[in-house]
Amino acid sequence: MTKLMSLHDAIKQYVEDGDCVYAAGFTHLIPFAAGHEIIRQGIKDLTLARATPDLIYDQMVAAGCARKVIFSYIGNPGVGSLRIIRAEVEAGGLEIEEYSHFGMISRLQAGASGLPFIPMNQTGACDLEQSNPNYKRVKDPYGGKDVVVLPPLHPDVAIVHVQRANDEGYAQIWGILGEQKEAAFAARHVIVTAEEIVPDEVIRSDPNRTLIPGFIVDAVCHVPYCSHPSYTQGYYDRDNVMYLAWDKISENPDEVKRYLDEWVYGVADRREYWEKLGKETHDRLKVRPRFSYPVDYGAY
């Protein structure tokens, strides 16, 4: 049964005020279009969870969508701080909950596995135990040293961007893998956004790339260029110009408002956003084909 719907309808149906939202993706496949749609729909009081909050969470905080951020690294990658989140935290207007990368992924793994907690080896990040009460220690029942444990994370909604999916939600990813699978299995609802919607036979032709199975997916949305200014491996490059520009924009609240008015509220959807970026940006972000070596799965 098809689960295809517009991104507008998927956000409207599955994201509510007060939810915990996990926008997955590491370095690439960051679902910026979904974050912009949440802003456009005026959804508030969210807990935004993500291993590496990118510009998208800075923009969502700027738009007043969030009350809390759960994270394991926070910054404008390669540039510096996320100025808006930092300012809100320092002003006492935004709660934070910090983990190591392994701690964050472990929480998702516990959520995906249905575990009440998950053990971790002691690490050099022991200062997190002093600032985050979710870090606890328990005795090793087999007589070893104490282990650190963390509770599961169960987002209300996980949003996962992928290169391709079929209309039932079977979704394929290649390139750098992040926490997409764990976030999807841990969440109560899953929205998949895809660069391409492909027939079943395309998915079946390369089953090892299917990280997200359709039976856990609630909505599938065809959203080309969803990740800009991040990138999608094989489709378009990272827009480093935009990452640098946001650092300057976010210094000034008036400039932030101007950006949101023009690039979020001022466009209807991702198609209009991409067209507005213009040919020069399109050409700059084009990537050359680089195919992997074919795999022969064999047949009877």
Image: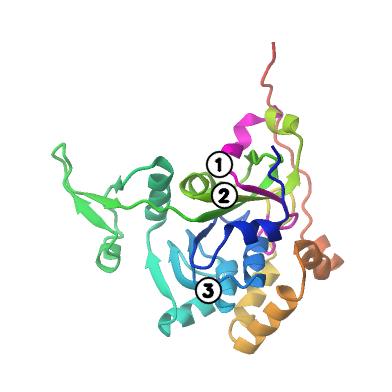
For image coordinates 51% across by 75% down, the residue present is: 81
Judging from the image, what secondary structure is the residue with disc 2 in?
A: strand
Judging from the image, what secondary structure is the residue with disc 1 in?
A: helix
Q: Earlier in the sequence, mark 2 or mark 1?
A: 2
Residue topped by disc 2: 190
Mark 3 or 2, which is nearer the eye? Answer: 2
Are the residues flagged by discs 2 and 1 in contact, CB closer than 8 Å? yes
Q: Which mark is residue 134?
A: none
| Residue type of the residue flagged with mark 1 | Ile
The local crowd at label 3, few if under 14, some if 14 to 19, many if 20 or more residues have their Cα within 10 Å, is few
Q: Is residue 225 magenta?
A: yes
The magenta segment: 205-231
The residues tagged by marks 2 and 1 sit, at their Cα atoms, a distance apart of: 7 Å
Residue topped by disc 1: 216
Residue topped by disc 3: 80
Residue 31 can be seen, yes or no: no
In the image, 153 versus 86, the foreground residue is 153
Say which quarter of the image contains residue 132: bottom left
Q: Earlier in the sequence, mark 3 or mark 2?
A: 3
For image coordinates 63% across by 71% down, the residue present is: 39
Q: Is residue 184 magenta?
A: no
